[in-house]
Amino acid sequence: MLRERVAYMAKQIQEILIDDLDGGEANETVAFALDGTSYEIDLSDVNAKKLRDSLAPFVGSARRAGAVAAPRRRRGGGTRALTREKSADIRAWAKSHGLNVSERGRIASKIVEEYERNH
């Protein structure tokens, strides 16, 4: 009786972080936010400590905001936000007129303007 030999292959994936400041080996990814924008930076222990130490006076005097997102600023153009019902009407109208409109998300201002001209 012959025994089958089964070869097992192992795979190891290693992620190596590179310090974004000095190009050396990093030990962690530090996340922070400023002026409503979130950032991540890979840093060595030394550089992570420098970042935390330099921010400490500001963090110590700040109040915690939690995970609440700041209100989104409107971009120029002055178009009003559409209700779900109106968006659905515009999408249906656009499709019936052969216009390319996505199923979800923002409707192109050209399509909204054309809809408004026709209604």
Image (tube, rainbow, N blue to C red):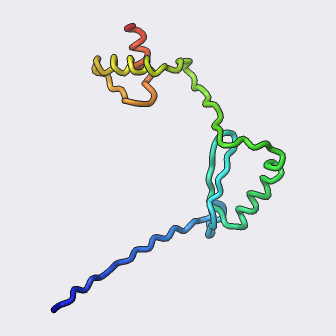
> Residue 52 location, x and y as percent?
75, 57
How many numbered markers are drawn?
0
> Residue 25 location, x and y as percent?
61, 70
Position of 57 relative to 118 (above/below) = below
Residue at screen point 63% across, 67% down: 27
Question: Quarter of the image holding residue 36?
Answer: top right
The residue lying furthest to the left in this view is 1
Residue at screen point 63% across, 37% down: 69
Question: Quarter of the image holding residue 77?
Answer: top right
Residue at screen point 37% across, 8% down: 118
Question: Quarter of the image holding residue 94?
Answer: top left
Quadrant the C terminus occupies? top left
Asked whether 20 or 7 is in front, the reply is: 7
> Residue 22 location, x and y as percent?
66, 64
The residue lying furthest to the bottom in this view is 1
- Along the horizontal axis of the image, is 100 left or right of 13? left
Residue at screen point 49% across, 20% down: 82
